[in-house]
Image: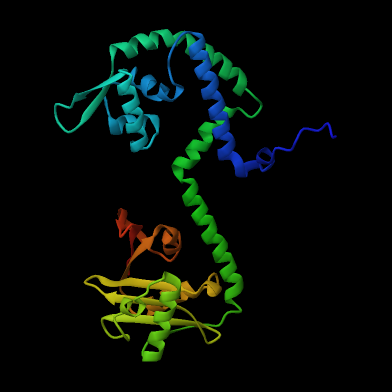
Amino acid sequence: MSSKEPVNLIDESGILAISTRLQRLSDQFRKDGLLLYKAFGIEFEPKWFPVIYTLQFKSPLSILELASEIGYAHPSTISLLKELEQQKLISSLRDKTDERKRLIILTGKAWELIEKMKPVWEVMIKVLSEVTQTENKLLQALNETEEQLRKKSFFERAQQLVETMKEQRSEKSSEAAEIEVRLVETTEAFKTSAAIVKSVLRKIDAEQSFAGISDDQNLNFLATVHDLPAGTCSCRKTKTGYKIEGLAVLEQYRGVGVGKALIDKLLVQKNEALEVHSPLALVTWFEKMGFQKKGKQQEESGNLYYKMILSR
């Protein structure tokens, strides 16, 4: 039997498992922190620390202000506050300027607990400094990483990279792909467009998604690659320009520039502002097409989207 230790695949996976390893490290710190508090005869959950520590320096704070200070989402902060309220470590006051607003403060019990915990915190600081003062400086690296994510989130960076990769594939493939975009002006072309929408967007009433064959108020385009149906785009006239109601590209033709060709054709056909309600997954793509987000994220029928505008 080999004397070698079993391979830890998570560790070997490198940067891909960074979230898992940070969670593992956090769990270890919390577990040992809890043991240390108990060793000092203190009943205290490490997860309560950010709220208690913050309120001893800044108080009172509204729930939103507190969430911002500790860097937690609003629902997570409320859940934490409920626990602390049950433990009688926090209480709330009514804001004199807004009766609907709760201001969070520490209770006398919490202040007594803080005095007991200060010697524990001194021990923690020394131990954590010893553990993290490595060649690569964990705390400094965390600060730098959080600053990077404040500038642009992990999800936004991933979306941008995916679109860049698609763009690169598109540039390589578009030279070989013979893309042609035409106005839908016949019943046959209209039915083909409706079939693409039904296939891509899973709309049973796909034909009702279009107002009909193209006219002055409604435009419907059909894109082909080597004379085979590949994608479609439908839009209708509004007071400010045209609103894209449906943009669909068959899976086998994605990444070769069909979507861009449809938008370009629409811009050539009508030199007016364009509007689209973009699902989150397509926001970055529409931004590359020149669209800009207007307002906050919205929801319709359980789907999240951004209203986006391309001004002309």
- Going 31% across and 22% down the picture, which residue do you hit? 86
- Going 54% across and 65% down the picture, which residue do you hit? 167
- Going 40% across and 64% down the picture, which residue do you hit? 290
Number of numbered labels in the structure image: 0
Which quadrant is home to the N terminus? top right
In-front residue for pair 272/192:
192
Residue placed furthest toward the right: 1
Do we see residue 77 in this rendering?
Answer: yes
Up the image or down, 59 lies above or below 190; here it is above
Estimate the x, y position of residue 26 in percent, counting from the top left.
Answer: 53, 29
Q: Which color scheme does this rendered protein use?
A: rainbow
Q: Quadrant of residue 195?
A: bottom left
Which quadrant is home to the C terminus? bottom left
Estimate the x, y position of residue 287 in percent, counting from the top left.
Answer: 42, 61
In-front residue for pair 174/92:
92
Report whether 236 appears left or right of 177: left
Estimate the x, y position of residue 110 in percent, counting from the top left.
Answer: 33, 14
Up the image or down, 207 lies above or below 8; here it is below
Do we see residue 264 in this rendering?
Answer: no
